[in-house]
Amino acid sequence: MNHPVVKHALASDGAAAAAAARARGAYAHVFDGVGVRNSGAALDGIATTLSLPAGTLRDLDALRDSLTDLSWLPVGEHVLIWRAASELAAADPKAYLAIRSVLSDAQRALGSAGWPGRPRLARTFSVEITE
């Protein structure tokens, strides 16, 4: 089965992407990446945006584990909207690609609520990157 990958939204500031997510009943989690220029800041920002449980480590493995669980969040579709991801991509391309890979892995693992075989009472996860 082909799963969608992280997509680039057309919204310039993420507001339209968040509004679209909310309009379909999803939880929109907007991470403002303005000024984020290293992996530590990006991991902290994503963790804060998604309200990761206290004590969760701030590394790629912990992020992957958390994003494929989401048990602390309400049941439903969760959309991480990463605004200004291009700032990290320009400042630290390797960190950007590593984090984006983790986000893609989590999205593939949790998929979309509309996929066959996905229970209706599941937590699903997707990512949109905006400028």
Image (cartoon, rainbow, N blue to C red):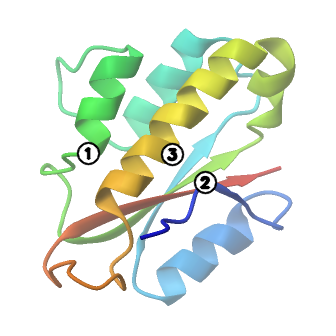
Of mark 1 and mark 3, the one earlier in the sequence is 1
Q: Position of residue 131 (x, y in %)?
A: 83, 49
Is disc 2 in contact with disc 3, using a CB cutoff of under 8 Å?
yes
Q: Which residue is mark 3?
A: 104
Question: Going from the N terminus, do you reach mark 2 or mark 3 first?
Answer: 2
The residue closer to the viewer here, 1 or 83, is 1
Above or below 62: residue 102: below
- Mark 1 residue element: loop
Left or right: 127, with 11 as reference point: left
**Which numbered dot is residue 96?**
none
**Residue 72 location, x and y as percent?**
14, 49
Q: Residue at x 33, y 79 (%)?
A: 113
- For residue 120, what is the image quadrant? bottom left
Q: Which residue is mark 2?
A: 6
Of the image marks 2 and 1, the number of the one nearer the N terminus: 2
Please name the residue shown 52% across and 88% down the image.
23
